[in-house]
Image: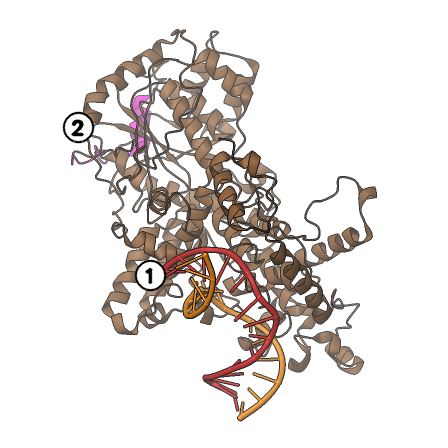
Chain colours: A brown, B orange, C red
Amino acid sequence: MNLTDFDDEVDELLFQQLLGGDTTATATAASDRDDRDDRDGDSLAALDDDIAATHAAIAAALQAEEDERHAELHMPLPTSPHAAAVAAAPTATAPTTATGDDIELHHELKAPAPPRAPPARVMRALVWFRRDLRVHDNLALLAALRRPGMAVVPLYIVHRPKIMLCGVNRFQFLIESVSGLSEALAARDARLLVARGDAEDVLARVLPAWGITHLFFDGVTEPFAIARDDRVRALAERLGVVVETTSGCTLYDLQAVIARNHGRAPKTYTSFLKAIATFPPPPRPLDAPERLPAPEWLPSELFQQVRDYWSDPARATADVAAQVEGLAGPEQQFTLPEVTEFGFEPAEHHSFIYGGESIALGILNEYCKNEGRVIKFEKPKTSPAETRPSASTTSLSPYLYFGCLSPRTFYHRVREIQERHKKASSAPPVSLDGQLLWREFFHCSGRANPYFDKMEENPVCLQIDWRWHAVPASEDALSDDERLARAQFEAWKEGQTGYPWIDAIMLQLKQEGWMHHLARHSVACFLTRGDLYISWVRGLEVFQERLIDHDWCINAGNWLWLSSSAFFSAYFRVYSPSTFGKKWDPEGKFIRKYLPQLRKMPVKYIYEPWKAPMTVQRAAGCLIGKDYPFPIVDHKIALKRCMAGMKASYAQRVYGTSPLEHIGRTVHAKRHRDSDSDTSDDAHDGQY
DNA sequence: AGGACCGTTGCGCCT
DNA sequence: CAGGCGCAACGGTCC
């Protein structure tokens, strides 16, 4: 969420209108990133903004305080020499809490309108919630609360994602999760503000208008999101706002893991395990705060402050006015939007997955009640044909992605149970804690590679001559095979392949936004190296749009894996589209649930209904070719074609080339080892 | 250096 | 019937 391309126009505006000047040292603990935004140094010298000047003074005064602090939160010590990470730390003072007054009353007493500008010399924290939609073990929130006497403004910024494809199921889940967070904060005397718009635009508007002195947020993994966060950090520093980031979205400091592994993400799970074994175990989760400081202002007052600030003749432009008006939603109350306000059609039927921290913790508790199930968990033995996931797998993945559930809470709960039954417990990679480590494994790769979800630019990705990879610009330019590939892709996407096992899974994805891990494997193999020989990138896009638990790193990692483009190379191991599901569901119950037209098909033909005699089809009320499609490919023939293509691609051994230097270095080394590969890029790759 | 061994999750045929 | 094995043979990692 909130990941948009940087808007140059806004940047220009900031140059002209916001404070330039010395930035305070920020306490960043997320990583050893030292590639500071290059706009930092050359901001205009016009210090025409008294508010910002006040902020700078406050920030400078806080510097001494900052220097005394040392890392105490959950941030592993940086190992890179470039690391500038110093965690904020808490001088062990209880957060200022409300006195228990009724909030409404409190606000009424505050009326009428507040001063035009917020009073100076007040420390005011903005806690920017992103993918940490929880109050338990929320490192950014707790970091803010540990500052004595600091006012706290909790903010979520929502908009329709622009970079990520996002379907209604995931957006709905997000809204529900933000709603849950809002309730959790309300129960602690606070009020979550929900702003609308591009995150950078919104922060540029509210940080100065509200007199924010400290910005807290929890870091994420995706390179494009980190770039966005770096721009926000630069913006805040120009405003004299102290920025503190935490790393609560993963168990380990993955940047440190990459550094320990000679600057490259581990390519195998075992080497990843070895790398993390040299680090201390993930810290224990922290409890939710009991109280937050009561809000200083009503939402409408906060909106008024923004409007007043930006209607100052020195700052106002038409663009700014428009951005400010849309900021707080209807009635300017910073309320939670409905999915329809972002152009989504509401889903016909709600997925069985509902968003929110309390639901996540409930699922975790319920799952862990059955300790035998926890300790014996072996992922390859769980069933891809479950219509409700909780019987075998936990279905906690979407909650992990949005941070409704802390990975540390999940990890330590599972490890405690495993420790009590040491001998009987399964172990990574197949165990439950092993699944959390797979998440870290793929996040490592994604963290190190901005082109992880691409083929040509991706150094770890074997180049394969997939069909329907580059989509021709015009209809006229399509070859016959491209037309066929497009039709086959659409059939796959909509669950119309004629293979009930594949189609039922694709319909489950569409309706529920979720599939079992092995079900994902089945359909991914079918699309790519198993049957259709269509580009994994097309499949990745469909999963990205439709999965509630979509995670950029994990999705790309698994598509690379399944298509034998990276990590996995036994391409001749192919999932059968008609027999694989039988192992878990010989009756075809799963198929019957998602494909009602096949409900009466006898067990004998449920996985291969085209083989049913006409009399059987008539009796079942399902004529193949009319009520349910014929298979779009013959598996045996399709498989032969795939094997030939894969064999040729593996013989070529051509990998992607990153436009970035530091990734190019890796390509260079790899190419060098492969004596028979094309070395024409070496001159280019060698230039640095 | 180069050979051995391993790799979360296959299939199909044999006993 | 569950379990073993051949399939045809990859890249990463270790020794």
Secondary structure at badge 1 equals helix
Closer-to-camera residue (A21/C11): C11
Query: Which residue does the image show at 36% across and 47% down from the upper left?
Result: A261
Against A212, is A259 above or below?
below
**Left or right: A630, with A593 as reference point:** right
What subunit carries mark 1? A
Indicate the secondary structure of the residue bearing disc 2. helix
Q: Is residue A295 magenta?
A: no
User: Which stretch did the figure color magenta?
Assistant: A91-111
Does residue A21 lie above or below A430 as drawn?
above
A359 and A301: which is toward the camera: A359
User: Looking at the picture, how far across and down is residue A20, in whole percent?
Assistant: 39, 13
The amino acid type found where label 1 is placed reads Asn
Please indicate whether residue A148 sits to the left or right of residue B12 in the image.
Answer: left
- Crowd around label 2: few <14 · some 14–19 · many ≥20 (10 Å): few
Of circles 1 and 2, which is in front? 2
Q: Is A296 situated left or right of A501 in this image?
A: left
Q: Position of residue A180 (x, y in %)?
A: 40, 45
- Where is A664 relative to A578, above or below? above
Residue linked to disc 2:
A68
Residue at the spot 30% in from the left edge and 47% down from the top edge = A136
* C-alpha gap between disc 1 and disc 2: 40 Å
Please name the amino acid that badge 2 sits on: Glu
- At a point 45% along the width and 52% down the height, the residue shown is A398
State which quadrant residue A191 falls in. Answer: top left
Identify the residue position indicated by label 1 in the image.
Answer: A365
Quadrant for residue A411, please give it.
Answer: bottom left
